[in-house]
C-alpha cells in the first residue's frame, strides 16, 4: 500500500491502523469549462477514487477520446526521444520548472518540429552511414581482389615466358621448311567473366558448394578472409566476411550466380582487370571515405546538440503529457448531463477529506473563471466501499505483508497492528542469535540511513525488495538480538554476559562434556539460558524441551489473539450471533484443550514436576476416568480435565447448529410482509450492513448457510490441532539455525585454527564468513521469513480475517512520473 495520501493542513484525524478510514460516496457536478482544472486539482489532492459511469461505452465513444489520442501521439514522440537519447548516451536533465506553466498546444507543436528534425537527421545519417559501409567493403574488395589478380598475373607471365623459351629451341631444330600457318577463328575464343563481392564467413562454405552444384562445376572461385569485422550496409551490424572472386562462362551461369549471391546476402561490387583503373578506383574510394567520415561526424554532432536540447525539457514535457493523459482518462469516467454543459462524477473518498475536496472544487472554479461553481454532495449507498489505511514509511511494509494475503474488508480489524510486533518476534524465535542479529541490523541501518539517496536510484529486483522492507528487517534484527540473548548464542558461542554461571564443578574430574558433578553454587542465571548448558550431553534434550514447549505457548497465545480479534469485529459490526455462537465456543474449545496444555507446561516449569504431558493429553481423551497417578500436577486435576473435555465437546454443536437457524429467523423477521424497507433518517452518509455486502434483498439459502457453517466448524476443530502443531516449526527452525551455526564454528573455524598454518587459517576464516553470510544470513533469513509469513497468514489470520475487500485506489499524480506506458 502506498504511504499516507494527501490530507495536508492538520485537518486529518489521527491515524487509525485498527480500522480503515470511514469512506463516503460523493458526487461532483462540474461545468465543462472548469472540468479539466477540477480533475487536475483533485489529482494533486489524491483522495478521490472515481467510478466509471461510462462503462457501457467503448473507449472511442467517450467524450475525450480525441484528446487521449492526441496525448498518446505526444507520448509516442516522447518515447522516441527517450530511445534516441539512450542510444546517444544523453541523460535527461532534472528541471525545476513547473509543468503546469507549460501549454499543451505549445508542447505539441514543439514535439512535432523536433521529431521532424530528428527524423530527417537520422535519415540522412543512415544514408551516409550506409554509403560509408559500402565504400569500406568496396575498398576491401579492391585490396583483396587486386592482390589475387596481381599475383595471378605475375605467375602467368613468368610461366608463359618459360614456355616460350623452351618452344623457341625446339622450333629451330624441328621446324619444316614449308609450314602452314594455323589461324584461330576469333569468334571461337572463350572469354571468362567474373564477379567480386563479400559473403558472410559462416555461409562461405555453403555458398561455394551451392555455386559449384548450380553450375555443374563450371566455375572457379577464390576466397580471401578479412581479419577484422566489418559493418554490413544492409543490417548495420558487425559481421565477419570473406572477399570472393567467381569466374564463370556464359550469361546463363552469370544469372545463376547472381541469384545465389542475392539469396546468401552477398554484397557484389564492380572490379576492373586493368591495374591502372584499379589504382584509380582505390584513390577515389579512399577520398570519398575521408569525406563521408567528416560529414557523418558533423551530422552526429548536430544530432547530439538537438538531443541535448530535448533533454533539457524532456522530464518536464514527459510529466506534463502523462498528467494530461491521466486527466482525460479520468474525465472519460464522468458522465455528460442532459444539457451537455456539465460533467457528473461519482467516487469514493475518506470522510475527513470532504473539506479539502470542496476547497479544490472552489479553487478550480475561480482559476478557470467559471461563472458557475461545482456542486459537491454525499450519496447514500449500500455498496461496499474500498479499504483505505493511512500508513507511513514504517508501517507500509507491514501493511503490504497483510495485503499480500488479501485486502481487508471495509472497516474490518486490521491484522497489521499486531503484525508489527508478532511478525519480527516469530522470525526471531527461529533466527535467535545476537551475533547474526547484529549483522542484519548493520545491513539494515545502511539502507535506513541512506534511504533518501537510495529511493531516487534504480535498484535491482532483490535490492528493491530489501529496501522496501527495510523497517521490517530492522525490527527482525532487533528481536533476533533479543532472542539471541535469551538463547545465549553469539555465532553459537555462549557468553556469561549478565552474571557467572549458577553451576560449578563438584571436583576437578568434572568434564565440560557432561553435567554430572555440577552443583548449583550461585543464584539462577538472571537472563536467558545459562552458558553452562553449552557443550554438555544434556544440551540438546534441554533446549529441545524448552523450545518445543515455548513454541506451543506462543502458538496458543497468538491463536487466542486471533479469536479475540474476531470478537472485536463482531462487536464493531454489531453481530451478537457471531459473539455468542462463534467467538465464545471457539474460545472454549481452544482453551479447554490447548490452553489447558499451556497451563500444564507453565505449572511443570514452576514446580519441576516429572509428569509426562504427552500421557496426560492423550489419556484425557482415551481414558478420561483413569487416575493420573504420578502425572498429576495439581489437586482435583481429573475433575478439571473432565470439565474441560465436556466443554470442548459441547462447543462443537454450539458452533455448528444455532447460528444457521438464528440467521434464518432474522431473515424471515426482516422481510416478513415487506416488499420495500424504509430508509432510516440518520446523519451518517454511509451504512454498511453487518455482512459487509449490503445485499439485504438477496434470497436466503438455508442449506448453503448450514453447509458453510458446517465447513467452518470442521475447519476450526481440525485446525485447532493442526495449527498448534504448525507452531512447532518455531522449535524446528530455531534448532536447525543453532546447529548449523555450531557446525560452521566447530567444524570450519576451530578445525582450521587447529593447524599451525597461516594459509589454512585464512582459508578457514574465509569459508566461515561465506558460509555464515550465504547460509545463515541469507538462506536462513529467507526461510524464517517465509515460515513467519505462513504462521501469520494461516494460523493467525484465519481466525478472524476475511480479506475480501478491495484497496482504495485514488486518482493521483504521485506515481505518474514513474509509470511506464
Image (spheres, helix red, strand yellow):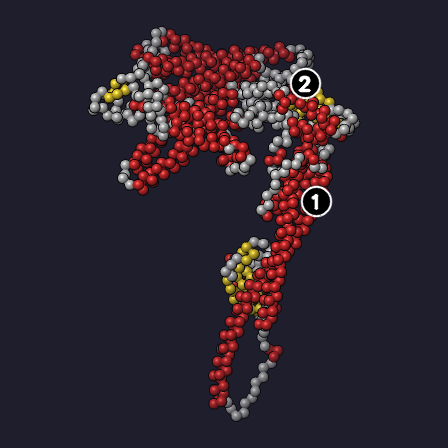
Residue at 69% across, 38% down = 71
Packing grade of label 2 (10 A; few <14, some 14-19, many >=20) is few
Return the mark for residue 559.
none
- What is the quadrant of the C terminus in the image? top right
User: Residue 465, position in %: x, y?
Assistant: 50, 33
Q: Is 447 on the left-hand or right-hand side of 268?
A: left
Q: CA distance from mark 1 to mark 2?
A: 48 Å
Examine the rendered structure and indicate whether residue 513 appears above or below residue 185: above
Q: Residue at x 68, y 51 (%)?
A: 120
Mark 1 or 2, which is nearer the eye? 1
Left or right: 148 in relation to 306: left
User: Residue 112 shows which numbered tag?
Assistant: 1
Q: Helix or strand or loop: what does disc 2 sit on? A: loop
Residue 505 sits above or below residue 233 on the image: above
Against 671, is 282 above or below?
below
Q: Quadrant of residue 719?
A: top left
* Residue sitting at x 49%, y 35%: 463
Q: Which residue is mark 2?
A: 380
Residue 767's spot in the image, x, y percent?
A: 36, 38
Residue 515 in sight here: yes
Residue 289 sits in quarter: bottom right
Amino acid at each position: 500500500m502506498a504511504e499516507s495520501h494527501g490530507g495536508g493542513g492538520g485537518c486529518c484525524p489521527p491515524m487509525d491502523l485498527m480500522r480503515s478510514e470511514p469512506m463516503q460516496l460523493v458526487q461532483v457536478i462540474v461545468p465543462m469549462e472548469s472540468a479539466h482544472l477540477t480533475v487536475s486539482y483533485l489529482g494533486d489532492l489524491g483522495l478521490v477514487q472515481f467510478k466509471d459511469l461510462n462503462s457501457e461505452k467503448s473507449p472511442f465513444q467517450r467524450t475525450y477520446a480525441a484528446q487521449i489520442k492526441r496525448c498518446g501521439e505526444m507520448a509516442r514522440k516522447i518515447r522516441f526521444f527517450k530511445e534516441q537519447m539512450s542510444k546517444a548516451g544523453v541523460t535527461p536533465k532534472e528541471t525545476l520548472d513547473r509543468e503546469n506553466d507549460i501549454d499543451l498546444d505549445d508542447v505539441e507543436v514543439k514535439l512535432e518540429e523536433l521529431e521532424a528534425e530528428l527524423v530527417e537527421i537520422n535519415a540522412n545519417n543512415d544514408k551516409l552511414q550506409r554509403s560509408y559501409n559500402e565504400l569500406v567493403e568496396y575498398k576491401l574488395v579492391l585490396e583483396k581482389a587486386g592482390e589475387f589478380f596481381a599475383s595471378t598475373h605475375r605467375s602467368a607471365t613468368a610461366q608463359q615466358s618459360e614456355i616460350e623459351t623452351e618452344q623457341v629451341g625446339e622450333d629451330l631444330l624441328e621446324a619444316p621448311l614449308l609450314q602452314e600457318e594455323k589461324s584461330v577463328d576469333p569468334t571461337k575464343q572463350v572469354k571468362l567473366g567474373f564477379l567480386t563481392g563479400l559473403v558472410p564467413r559462416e555461409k562461405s562454405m555453403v555458398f561455394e558448394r551451392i555455386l559449384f552444384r548450380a553450375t555443374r562445376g563450371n566455375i572457379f572461385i577464390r576466397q580471401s578472409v578479412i581479419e577484422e569485422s566489418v559493418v554490413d550496409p544492409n543490417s548495420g551490424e558487425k559481421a565477419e566476411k570473406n572477399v570472393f572472386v567467381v569466374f564463370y562462362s556464359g550469361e546463363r551461369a552469370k544469372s545463376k550466380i547472381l541469384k545465389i549471391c542475392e539469396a546468401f546476402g552477398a554484397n557484389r561490387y564492380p572490379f576492373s582487370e586493368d591495374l591502372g583503373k584499379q589504382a584509380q578506383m582505390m584513390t577515389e574510394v579512399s577520398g570519398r571515405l575521408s569525406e563521408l567520415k567528416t560529414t557523418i561526424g558533423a551530422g552526429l554532432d548536430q544530432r547530439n546538440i538537438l538531443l541535448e536540447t530535448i533533454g533539457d525539457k524532456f522530464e518536464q514535457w514527459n510529466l506534463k503529457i502523462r498528467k494530461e493523459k491521466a486527466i482525460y482518462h479520468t474525465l472519460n469516467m464522468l458522465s455528460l448531463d442532459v444539457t451537455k454543459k456539465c460533467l457528473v462524477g461519482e467516487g469514493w473518498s475518506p470522510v475527513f477529506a470532504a473539506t479539502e475536496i470542496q476547497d479544490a472544487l472552489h479553487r478550480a472554479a475561480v482559476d478557470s473563471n467559471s461563472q458557475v461553481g461545482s456542486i459537491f454532495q454525499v450519496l447514500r449507498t449500500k455498496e461496499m466501499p474500498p479499504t483505505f489505511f493511512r500508513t507511513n514509511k514504517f508501517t507500509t511494509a507491514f501493511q503490504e505483508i497483510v495485503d499480500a494475503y488479501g485486502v481487508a474488508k471495509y472497516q474490518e480489524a486490521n491484522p497489521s497492528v499486531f503484525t508489527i510486533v508478532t511478525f519480527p518476534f516469530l522470525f526471531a524465535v527461529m533466527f535467535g542469535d545476537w551475533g547474526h542479529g547484529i549483522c542484519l541490523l548493520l545491513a539494515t541501518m545502511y539502507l535506513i540511513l541512506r534511504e533518501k539517496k537510495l529511493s531516487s536510484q534504480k535498484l535491482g529486483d532483490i535490492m528493491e525488495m530489501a529496501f522496501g522492507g527495510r523497517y521490517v528487517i530492522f525490527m527482525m534484527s532487533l528481536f533476533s538480538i533479543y532472542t539471541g540473548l535469551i538463547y545465549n548464542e553469539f555465532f553459537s558461542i555462549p557468553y556469561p554476559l549478565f552474571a557467572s554461571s549458577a553451576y560449578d564443578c563438584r571436583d576437578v574430574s568434572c568434564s565440560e562434556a557432561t553435567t554430572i558433578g555440577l552443583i548449583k553454587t550461585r543464584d539462577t542465571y538472571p537472563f536467558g539460558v545459562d552458558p553452562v548448558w553449552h557443550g554438555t550431553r544434556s544440551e540438546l534434550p534441554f533446549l529441545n524441551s524448552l523450545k518445543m514447549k515455548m513454541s506451543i505457548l506462543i502458538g496458543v497465545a497468538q491463536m487466542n489473539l486471533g479469536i479475540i480479534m474476531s470478537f472485536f469485529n463482531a462487536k464493531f459490526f454489531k453481530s451478537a450471533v457471531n459473539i455468542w455462537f462463534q467467538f465464545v465456543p471457539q474460545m472454549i474449545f481452544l482453551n479447554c484443550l490447548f490452553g489447558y496444555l499451556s497451563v500444564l507446561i507453565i505449572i511443570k516449569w514452576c514446580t519441576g514436576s516429572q509428569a509426562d504431558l504427552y500421557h496426560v493429553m492423550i489419556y484425557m481423551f482415551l481414558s478420561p476416568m483413569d487416575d493420573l497417578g504420578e502425572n498429576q500436577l495439581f489437586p482435583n486435576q481429573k475433575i478439571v480435565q473432565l470439565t474441560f473435555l465436556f466443554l470442548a465437546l459441547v462447543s462443537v454443536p454450539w458452533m455448528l447448529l444455532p447460528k444457521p437457524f438464528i440467521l434464518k429467523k432474522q431473515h424471515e423477521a426482516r422481510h416478513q410482509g415487506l416488499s420495500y424497507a424504509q430508509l432510516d433518517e440518520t446523519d451518517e452518509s454511509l451504512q454498511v450492513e453487518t455482512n459487509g455486502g449490503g445485499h439485504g434483498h438477496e434470497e436466503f439459502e438455508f442449506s448453503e448457510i448450514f453447509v458453510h457453517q458446517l465447513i467452518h466448524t470442521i475447519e476450526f476443530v481440525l485446525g485447532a490441532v493442526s495449527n498448534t502443531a504448525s507452531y512447532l516449526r518455531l522449535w524446528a527452525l530455531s534448532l536447525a539455525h543453532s546447529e548449523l551455526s555450531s557446525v560452521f564454528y566447530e567444524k570450519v573455524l576451530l578445525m582450521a585454527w587447529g593447524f599451525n598454518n597461516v594459509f589454512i587459517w585464512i582459508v578457514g576464516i574465509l569459508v566461515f564468513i561465506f558460509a555464515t553470510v550465504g547460509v545463515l544470513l541469507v538462506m536462513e533469513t529467507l526461510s524464517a521469513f517465509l515460515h513467519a509469513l505462513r504462521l501469520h497468514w494461516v494460523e493467525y489470520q484465519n481466525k478472524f480475517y476475511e480479506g475480501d475487500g478491495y484497496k482504495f485506489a485514488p486518482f493521483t499524480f504521485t506515481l505518474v512520473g514513474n509509470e511506464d506506458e
